[in-house]
Amino acid sequence: MKIVLIGPIAVNAREKIEALLEREHEILCLEDEKDAARYGELLAQADAIVGWPLSAEVVALARKVRLIQVMGAGVDGVPFDLIPSGAVVANTYHHEPAIAEHVLMAILVLWRRPHLYDESLRRGEWLHSCIWGEVPQLDVLAGRMLLVIGVGRIGRAVARLAKAFQMRVVGVTDHASEDAGAFDQLVPYNSLHQELPAADFVVVCCALRPSTRGLINSDVLARMKPSAFLINVARGPVVDERALFEALSQRRIAGAAIDVWYQYPTDPAQPCWPSRYPFHELPNVLMTPHISGWSRCTLEGRIRDVAENLNRLAAGRPLLNVVYPPGAKPGN
């Protein structure tokens, strides 16, 4: 088969992917998809493309492709309207344990503010210490409500960890009748506004699709209580950029932890602010550069899945994690 690896993640994983393949294949590495036109003839012969995101130009050139294998879970970067007939799109996961740990870390940092006490003690100041006998400024998470928007693999992993802290966990889902698992309750999306006023933490971990783009808007943020925190580990555009900045800067919500953004760098040598608004100037924001799911465990699992699907494609066996078209098999 002819296999094209696109983007730095897929290209850097070439040796490990190749080591797991059951047969020898012709592999082309395309680190920057902007170079697609230069490799148009090779893309036109590709049996499989591995990478993300995939530009319309790449997909338009790959007219014989049978498998488009995304190197992650999100497929919002795939131009489905250009996929040739008979091609299959598959994704991969393994990020949910890391993201769930990140969410609980963010909750604890926002709730317990260890950085504040670290900074004060480094100045010799014993802020809010029990030695002064002051009224405690901190509280425990037990009994606090965590509202999880999206109850897929990530949402359920978050719920399991949150229950270890004895939090009350409510999930927002398209399928409120499904097994609740670690959730105390599942509610439909049309009940979101009713649940928000009771939430101490709102965690966004749903997929980006037309119905969720801008889901967390000024109206939703206005329904959160002033002491509540928002955590976004889904996609930046699920949360309205301007509405979030205004809610945080005006202290209409207590704070936020943001791992997914609105602007991403294209040149590692050039600084890139993650938003057109100065979130970096706000003291009530915990900012991370899209790292919540990026662990060694995540990458190793994804490499195994990619290689397995390439082996299955070569052997004509059904593929794993097919997201488009549902239930498709190679060659259909």
Image: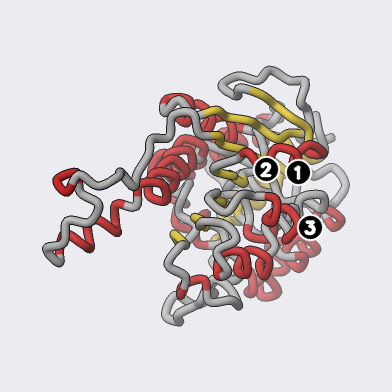
Give the position of the C terminus as an image quadrant: top right
Q: What is the x, y in percent for residue 246?
A: 62, 69
Kind of element beneath mark 2:
helix
For the residues labelled 1 and 2, the Cα–Cα distance comes to 5 Å
Three-letter code for the amino acid on which mark 3 is drawn: Pro
Other residues around mark 1 within 10 Å, as few (<14) / some (14–19) / many (≥20): some
Q: Which mark is residue 193?
A: 1
Q: What is the x, y in percent for residue 236?
A: 63, 59
Q: What is the x, y in percent for residue 312?
A: 64, 31
In the displayed structure image, the side of residue 37 where residue 114 appears, left or right: left
Kind of element beneath mark 3:
loop
Relative to the observer, which residue lies in front, 23 or 69?
A: 69
Residue at x-position 58% and y-position 46%: 72
Tag 1–tag 2 contact (CB < 8 Å): yes
In the displayed structure image, the side of residue 62 where residue 155 appears, left or right: left
Relative to the observer, which residue lies in front, 177 or 18?
A: 177
For the residues labelled 2 and 3, the Cα–Cα distance comes to 34 Å
Q: Which mark is residue 196?
A: 2
Decide which of tag 2 and tag 3 comes sooner along the chain. Answer: 3
For the residues labelled 3 and 1, the Cα–Cα distance comes to 32 Å
Other residues around mark 3 within 10 Å, as few (<14) / some (14–19) / many (≥20): some
Q: Residue furthest left?
A: 124
Query: Badge 3 is on which residue?
Result: 79
The image shows residue 51, relative to residue 88, as above or below, that is: below
Give the position of the N terminus as an image quadrant: top right
Other residues around mark 2 within 10 Å, as few (<14) / some (14–19) / many (≥20): many
Tag 3–tag 1 contact (CB < 8 Å): no
